[in-house]
Amino acid sequence: MNPFSAYVPTGEKRYRERFGLDFEQFVAGQKFKHRPGLTLSQQDSRDECLDTLNQQMLHFDEQFAAHGEWKKCLMDSTLTTKVVLGMTWKTFAKRVQLLGFDEITLPKPTFGGDTLYAESEILEHAANPDTPHAGRVKVRTLGRNQRGETVAILVWEALIARAGHDDFTRLDY
């Protein structure tokens, strides 16, 4: 008997961390809080702007931003989106394929120093005839800041491996 639900036995007195749920474990209406949160810095935003060649001064020029609506630099929106989606990886680690996004909405700004948290709700759960080893899951992920304000809404679909079809997670190295 395995005494550790978050670990898979790999040998005598040896275990590997288990991440992700099987397709069969998801049900429409389930909600998952993803932790830990992540505090973003203004430097994170500058780095994202450099990586994506985003030259919008609102992200890195405090003097320019001081004359805008929020009076300070905004976090780059692609960074906010990537961080919020990235926080879901432990729950959806058995994702075989990200099928796409139905919605990416950023209703409030994110600033350097904000801490982001994510929560996901399973909207749909269905077999996929084209992929017997995986099923389709539709998810709404909300990103919230430390004040509880929703700063990101992501609605996306993925193929999740069925139980016994997650060979990529069985590697013991």
Image (cartoon, rainbow, N blue to C red):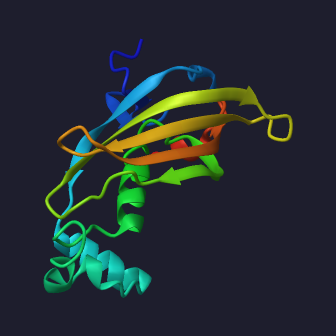
| Figure check: 30 above or below 89 | above
Residue at (26, 58) in percent of width and height: 110
- Residue 5 location, quadrant: top left
In this image, 108 relative to 100: left or right? Answer: left
Quarter of the image with the N terminus is top left
Q: Quadrant of residue 51?
A: bottom left
Residue 145: x and y in percent read 24, 46
Seen as rendered, the residue at the extreme top is 1
Residue 135 image point, x, y percent: 71, 33
Q: Nearer the viewer, residue 17 or 123?
A: 123
| Front residue of 16 and 29 | 29
Q: Quadrant of residue 53?
A: bottom left
Identify the residue at image location x=36%, y=65%.
Answer: 79
Q: Number of callouts in the render?
A: 0
Residue 68 visible to an observer of this rendering? yes
Which residue of the protein is positioned furthest toward the right in this rendering? Answer: 129
Task: Please state the horizontal and vertical placement of residue 70, each as a whole percent of the image.
Answer: 21, 66
| Residue name at image x 63 percent, y 43 percent | 157
Q: Nearer the viewer, residue 128 or 104?
A: 104
* Horizontal side of residue 146 vs 153, given as left or right: left
Q: Check the image and report above or below for 118 versus 110.
A: above
Q: Is residue 163 visible?
A: no
Q: Residue at x 57, y 23 (%)?
A: 26
